Amino acid sequence: MPCLELAFTHGPMAAAVLVRGAIAWANVPFAHALGLDPRVCQGKRLLELLPPEGARVRLPAAGCSASYRTRIAGAPVRVDLSAAPGGRERPVGVLLSPHLDDADTTANRALLTLSREAAAARTDRELVAAVVHALEVLFPGRSFCIRLVDPKTFALTAIEAHGRLRSRGARGADRIALRRAAILRTGLSEEALRAGGVEIAERDEPILEGCQTARVVPLAAGGTLYGAINLESQRGRSANTEADEPWLLHVANQAAQGLRNLRSIEELTFFKNYLEELIENANALIVVANRDREILVFNRAITRLTGFSREHALEEDLLSLVSDVDRDQAMRVFSRSLAGEAVTNVELRLALRSGGEARVSVNTAPVYGSSGAVEGFIAIGQDLTLLRAMEERAEHAQKLAGFGQLAAGIVHEINNPLTTITAYSDNLIERLSRAEHDPGDLEKLRRISDAGQRILRFSRDLSAYARPSDAKTESVDLAAILDQAAQMCEPVLRASGAKLERGFQPVPAIAGNKGSLLQVFVNLITNAAQALRGSGTVRLELEKSGGSVVARVRDDGCGMPEEVKARAFEPFFTTKPDGRGSGLGLSIVQGIVGRHAGEISVESQDGVGTTFTVSLPRRAKGPIARPAPRS
């Protein structure tokens, strides 16, 4: 025993090389471990110098390994053999190592280590490595193969073999075969296994080259198959598979539980990522906060609305996003949710990063932790900004409609006395002219008559413009429509200091609706006048182009930047101050032109000016569609 301890304490690993079972070379530690001179060891038969305990041992086949236990001076020793690949003269390496624990203690310790490592494993690779280590300790020198499968399809996903796998022509590693007794013991469904391509066998067959016996146990937990472990014995080496099976089952059970935990973690991770993506990409505004109102979740929809990034919002007080006007109300809603109450349909105003406010409808609900206590709350909102703006504009339009009805009544009342004024003034002009009255007085009467006639024409045009248009198609002179529109827009042109120019080429009449086309050009001329900065020019152009008549309304006013021009025909979009525009004018114009089978386009340069081009076909392509009635 002292010699053995000295060899292992003060020297390298005891090693030797065998040829045909005899020692061809042995190092000093190997000889010292046996209490011999290194030269005396040469030529000795290894199994005579170190006889195995228990079963008879054969030297391993080419490329394989084996091990057995023996004793030197009463001390337990493990002998590991490794045969080099080659022919009959292949050398076999020998290593000696002390084996101080008995088999039961070693096995229990290996299973304890496997249990700990399987619980800590986070990947299949880590778990397989732990199983490999346990098998090496429990079954030294034995060949084995670990195969993992997809629990749903039973397709092979991973394989770890200690030994060379047989070719696919024989029973290969890609074909899982399980004994019926092993299936019944683990609670697997034989029908489900057959449907998935797993073979049901009466005896286990090896899948590693050079092995003649095998014991296969399934990796199964909760009625689900995760793989199989093959423990095999080489030809010429006796093995008690019945005695191996209990230890092998211990390893398989712990490995299966580890794989089940890994699959559960994978499913939970997938479900967690799925929910995160669902929340992140939802159209609804979603925020989650803890009991201190610190933001934990801030999805993309609310980022787009408020302009605040997720990084800026996380861990901030949710109240900081609420407008000062609504913070007291928001505080009451959040407190109710933290008390376990769900609150619905609360309208709040959120502060925007760019300035201004957004109006949202919010539903809140408490978020419970594993203990059952409220740990925070979730707020799900809907942007009401556009809806409220539409409601306000509809209300404004309703007011304008009321004023329009009032104005129509006023125009009607004005027309009667104006008709009298113009008729009497004309009569006086005629009588005083025959009487050769004072020319100055006659001129004054003519001016009175002209002014009255002008008011009458304007009131008639205004009434015609305001009157609901029908879908009647008639021959329309666009030059006359443009002149009439310019006359109706004279007040706004004068107020803007605009100079009106005309550039009309002879054009044919078109088929259309006069009232609707008049509305188009009144709107375009009004917009052009309002775009001027105290002075400028509004130019009306008319020309023929192929089978169409093209009208243009140009101005040299403020123009539009690209982002405004891109939204020019968008309903309810306006750059005018509140109360000066509803954002519907150009949208209505586009609809009227479209009903005439025409096209409208805009060219504009910021600070230079704008041109609207209306192209209308000479002949209508079918009846002009009647606009849908407004509710």
Image (tube, rainbow, N blue to C red):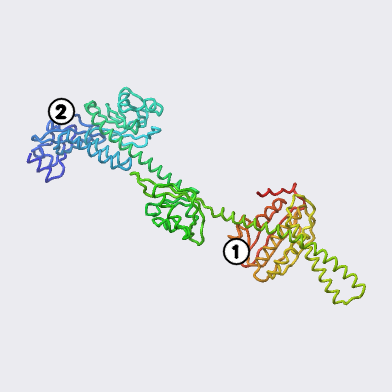
User: Which amino acid is tagged 2?
Assistant: Gly
Res 442 label: none
Image quarter for residue 213? top left
Determine the secondary structure under disc 1: loop
User: Which amino acid is tagged 1?
Assistant: Pro
Res 577 label: 1
Relative placement, left or right, of 297 versus 420 is: left
At a point 37% along the width and 36% down the height, the residue shown is 157
Which is more toward the observer, 373 or 357? 373
Q: Is residue 562 above or below residue 150?
A: below
Going by the picture, which residue comes out furthest to the left?
A: 2
The image shows residue 554 at horizontal and vertical percentages of 69, 64
The quadrant of the image that shows the N terminus is: top left
Looking at marks 1 and 2 on the same chain, the residue that comes earlier in the sequence is marked by 2
Relative placement, left or right, of 45 versus 177 is: left
Gap between marks 1 and 2 measured at Cα: 102 Å
Q: Is residue 337 above or below residue 267?
A: below
Q: Is residue 342 above or below residue 56?
A: below
Relative placement, left or right, of 526 versus 83 is: right
Determine the secondary structure under disc 2: loop
Mark 2 crowdedness (10 Å alpha carbons): few <14, some 14-19, many ≥20: few
Relative placement, left or right, of 268 versus 423 is: left
The image shows residue 269 at horizontal and vertical percentages of 38, 43
The image shows residue 404 at horizontal and vertical percentages of 70, 58
The image shows residue 382 at horizontal and vertical percentages of 51, 50
Which is more toward the observer, 476 or 599? 476
For disc 2, the marked residue is 54
Mark 1 crowdedness (10 Å alpha carbons): few <14, some 14-19, many ≥20: few
Which is more toward the observer, 285 or 216? 285
Which is more toward the observer, 26 or 186? 186
Image quarter for residue 64? top left
